[in-house]
Amino acid sequence: MSIGRVTMMEFSSEEAIEEAEVEYKKIRAEAFPTLELVLNIRTGPKSVMSVAVYPSKESADSNLPARKEYQDRLAANIKDSFYHEGEVSYFFQPKANRS
């Protein structure tokens, strides 16, 4: 069963979000090797919602130490951060239009 994790983060500035996403791109493959999908949505000038999907609960749990390390590195610029997770009960992604 796939697990979805939705993380909400409030940063100190718009620049801090940019820096966090640059850092995330650098560490993603190594820190989150079982990640099947990640989607970041800017919900405000200084906030972001990140939706991640993992193949199992064990897989999602296995990256919690790397997640904490990443957020610890950004701690000076994060005003608030929390997440919810649960079973993915519906997922749809159309095939890419191949014109």
Image (cartoon, grey):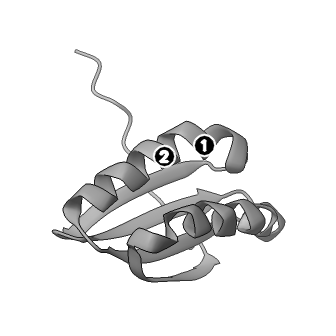
Residue for point 83% across, 67% down: 58
Residue type (three-letter) at the residue carrying disc 2: Glu
Residue type (three-letter) at the residue carrying disc 1: Ile
Outermost residue to the top? 99
Q: Which mark is residue 23?
A: 2
Q: Quadrant of residue 11?
A: bottom left
> Tag 1: Cα neighbours inside 10 Å, few (<14), some, or many (≥20)?
some
- Judging depth in this view, the residue of 28 and 73 nearest the camera is 73
In this rendering, position of residue 4 left or right of residue 14: right
| SS at badge 2 | helix
Report x, y in % for residue 20: 41, 55
Q: Which mark is residue 27?
A: 1
Residues at badges 1 and 2 in contact (C-beta under 8 Å)?
Answer: yes
Outermost residue to the left? 45
> Tag 2: Cα neighbours inside 10 Å, few (<14), some, or many (≥20)?
some
Report x, y in % for residue 42: 24, 64
Q: Quadrant of residue 45?
A: bottom left
User: In the rendered picture of this protein, how many numbered marks are placed on residues?
Assistant: 2
Q: Is residue 32 above or below residue 84?
A: above
